Image: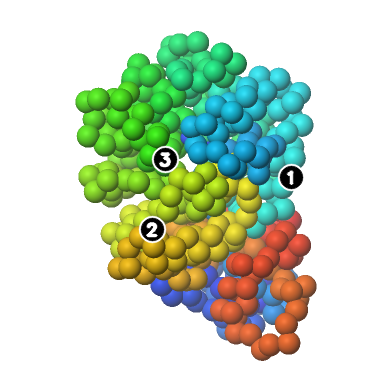
Amino acid sequence: MNERTFVLKGTICYSNSLTELSITENGYLVCEDGRCAGVFDELPEKFAGISCTDFGDELIIPGLTDLHLHAPQYTFRASGMDLELLDWLNTYTFPQEARYEDTEFAKEAYSVFAEDMKKSPNTRACIFGTLHVPATEILMEQLDKTGIKAMVGKVNMDRNGSPQLQEESAQASADATVQWIKDTLDKFENVKPILTPRFTPSCSDELMEKLSEIQKRYHLPMQSHLSENFGEIAWVKELCPNTHFYGEAYSQFDLFGGDCPTIMAHCVHSSDEEIALMKKQGVYIAHCPQSNTNLSSGISPVRRYLDEGLHIGLGSDIAGGTSVSILRAMADAIQVSKLYWRLVDSSMKPLTVEEAFYMGTEGGGSFFGKVGSFKEGYEFDAVVLNDSTIPTPLKLSPKDRLERLIYLSDDRNITAKYVAGRKIL
Ligand code: GUN
Ligand code: FE
């Protein structure tokens, strides 16, 4: 029998829809060839011979997706949190990212990051590296070994960096990108390249044009930043006086969704036109509540994005955010949505546990295809959570236990983790 065919028994919980959880106590979750074959109260006869691991009443949830984070920033998370975005980038981020020129430093720093990602409840991630090709390939190699499935980007930046952190020219940046794509497109089982222009202030028009050609040639997905901070938005307006809104600085080069799947991180201050274009082009929003709070960026209007049916998942945005756990991002998303409702717009109801859970599982997971659910045919990403180390004399329902784990759990509560039917923890 195939090693990616097995059964897990426990309290199985996943999203039926944005607003509804499916919960099966003492349920059987079947994995067949790395894909979900269903959730059952009683194990059907045809699966009777398959090996079954009984996790008692532990919770089994779909693996979580971190739709936006910066691996090189893991070293200095929780530093400089008194600054806003542009000052934080210049003071902390760029000098630290410049250190990844040194491959020995990259190996050491990325091994700590990869190890912590492995121990987290996340099974998928879309990750920024630095502009350095050798260091980015080291990151990809180390992540690949963890078994987590990830898209990783060599960052493009040919302007407004620092003497230590900027590519020589648009041509040099494009050439390095093509070399890196050729090196890594088919090299890893679990990790794939994703095009990563840092953000408009970091990329000249000439570079954006070249990246658009590269994207079409290799049909690559893309990730970047959008409408995160007021200073940043005003700067983009100056840099691109012909555009009506920030998103147009990407869409004018055909780098804004459509044929190639695209993630834009933040979208805290997007205009009506920008939101309409994201919807039309199927752009994914990576909502990063912890980062938006730490860097005083603001509160993203997530209720509106959900109501308007945009694609949206959660991101840690390390090191704007400090915690890699997407369970923590769910709690943060709920909390900031309450402040938005109370302080900004009383017609925008706070997020529910169901909605935050959906965004952290299927919402972000769908960027990877059929991922983030236990519906039949989905890739088998699962996390087993043990809440017995957070004792309470209360008799809790599975939904109450899930909510408590969202707010209270850490890596010690993770019993096991599976990615595409392979046990990695
Ligand atoms: N915008 C451009 N670069 C960055 C970064 O590294 N972090 C965040 N939060 N926003 C950015
Ligand atoms: Fe970011």
- What residue is disc 3 on? 229
- What residue is disc 2 on? 302
- What residue is disc 1 on? 115
Left or right position of 386 against 359: right
Asked if residue 184 can be seen in this view, the reply is no
Type of amino acid under label 2: Val
Disc 2 within 8 angstroms of ligand 2 (CB): no
Residues 168 and 53: in front is 168
| x then y, percent, for residue 403 | 58, 73
Disc 3 within 8 angstroms of ligand 1 (CB): yes
Labels 2 and 1 touching (C-beta < 8 A): no
Q: Nearer the viewer, mark 2 or mark 1?
A: 2
Q: Residue at x 72, y 53 (%)?
A: 119
Separation of marks 2 and 1 at Cα, in angstroms: 31 Å
Image position of 74 with respect to 340: above or below: above
Type of amino acid under label 3: Asn
Image position of 251 with respect to 423: above or below: above
Which comes sooner in the sequence, label 1 or label 3?
1
Secondary structure of the residue carrying tag 1 is helix
| x then y, percent, for residue 103 | 71, 22
Q: Nearer the viewer, mark 1 or mark 3?
A: 3
Image position of 243 with respect to 17: above or below: above
